[in-house]
Amino acid sequence: MKNKFKVLIADDEPSVRELLRNILEDVGVLEIEEAEDGESALSLINGQGFDLIFLDIKMPKTDGMSVLKELSQSGNMPRIIVITAFGDFSTALQAMGLGAFDYLNKPFDIEEIKNQTLRVMHLKELEEEVKSLRRKFPEAREFREQIVGRSEKMLEIIKTVGRIAPSPVTVLIMGESGTGKELIARAIHGASPRREGLFLPVNCAAIPETLLESELFGYEKGAFTGAQVRTPGKFELADGGTIFLDEIGDMSLSLQAKVLRVLQDKTFMRIGGKEPVTVDVRVIAATNQDIEEMVRMGRFREDLYYRLNVCLLKIPPLRERREDIEELTYYFLEKYSREYGKQVNRVTPETMEKLLTYSWPGNVRELENYVARAVASSAAQVLTPEDFPLPEEKMEKGEIPLLPLAKATEELEKRLIKEALEVAGGNQTQAARILQISRQTLATKIKEYGIKID
């Protein structure tokens, strides 16, 4: 560690404090403080900056849960591993809802304590590197503001972004819908020497195949009916900048061949053109599909895949980085409170527990939509569980009545489609991905069920 790593052990049992101290010293922690009750722990925490706190839930004077609640309201909570009785999962879950990093059951697993400590030490190193990157690239707003998360996976991604941004290397970003692939692409562009040039996103899934070629490569006057003037495409407009090919897995094989040529030769032909156009464009592509499987099935060109996959970034779904949910929630609270002129500034512990345990199939975009909706509709400054009517909860409450199986299936499908469309903001392509069905299947069901699209 470049900087010292400070740990507090708060437990009323001297034998437990001694055991934890020995384990911590064994992994190289040099600065260790101890507290025998919650009151002493709070006093030490308020006076010093700890990187990690082992916090026993059951302590005299002030118990661990009270300490955790007070720290959760401070806005600058260190990483806390709570210590609970064996099998006390409800307390552990409540603690996680208040922002605890993890929990340990008594009796301890020594290797687990070592691994958790080493993990937090590694996270601190990553955070220091990310802070350095944010200072290094002040022009990249996404680096400073929008790429939110303290999880190890996200910190590793931000670190990689900072490493690859200055070079012209082609990047392939993979991740489920709503994970923030375009945000990462914008951060790469903003931290690169091309940041003065344009960043042009193209959603390959949202543009009909017949129009996508002209959108990418442009066309000459008279190339087809309605082509009144020469019109440049996105590749030409992005010369000196970056083009972001979102959902490239939906691109036809014939267009893939033309994109490959741009990557190989930096040239392309406008539709109806006779002379090649030369451009200097960085290509960043993204997909929520399994490209390797598509290559095996012959649905994606292998040579293009290897050209794109010079640097691969895999964005984890939100359910795999739940430790980021609280920070993201408060980021969106601040964003939409400011945007809507509201004073909504926090959520109750029960609300955070609910958000932490939901599966978030729509990922960060789904969380953002729910927070925006809650802020817009709430008249209070503190959001409660009722402000977040999550889809799974609606089914658990029995809002779907007992019906014949076929009818119940229809009602369930209809509700899920409506929920997905709402989460996706009416974007049918996005909703289809959330539901894991094809865009055509979704369109058929919307028509079949008479679902109105706002």
Image (cartoon, grey):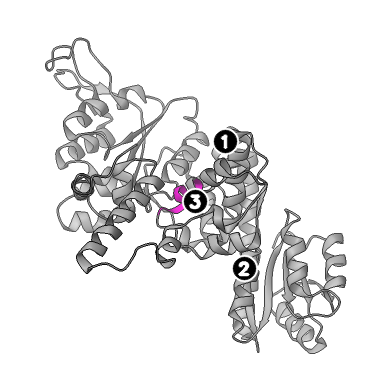
Give the image quarter of residue 171: top left
Q: Residue at x 20, y 65 (%)?
A: 406
Query: Of the residues under marks 3 and 1, which one precedes in the sequence?
Result: 1
- For label 3, count other residues whose C-alpha is less than 10 Å away and answer few (under 14), some (14-19) or many (20+): many
Give the main secondary structure, helix, strand or loop, of the magenta stretch: helix
Q: How far across and how far down the image is residue 309, in percent? A: 33, 49
Q: Which mark is residue 141?
A: 1
**Regarding mark 2 in the picture, which secondary structure is present there?**
helix
Eyeballing the image, is 171 above or below 98?
A: above
* Residues at circles 3 and 1 in contact by the CB criterion of under 8 Å: no
The picture places residue 271, in percent across and down from the top left corner, at: 16, 22
For residue 4, say whether it is visible. no
Q: Which residue is mark 2?
A: 96
Name the residue type under label 2. Answer: Met
The Cα atoms of the two marked residues, 3 and 1, are separated by 21 Å
Residue at the image position 62 percent from the left and 87 percent from the top: 86
**Residue 67 drawn at (x, y percent):** 77, 68
Q: Earlier in the sequence, mark 3 or mark 2?
A: 2
Q: Residues within 10 Å of mark 2 (few under 14, many from 20)?
A: many
As drawn, which residue projects farthest toward the top? Answer: 228
Q: Which mark is residue 367?
A: 3
What range of the chain is rendered magenta?
362-368
Tell me the residue at 60%/76% (across/down).
115
Q: Foreground residue, 262 or 102?
A: 102
Q: CA distance from mark 3 to mark 2?
A: 18 Å
- The quarter in which the C terminus is drawn is top left
Tell me the quarter of the picture where residue 451 sits. Answer: top left
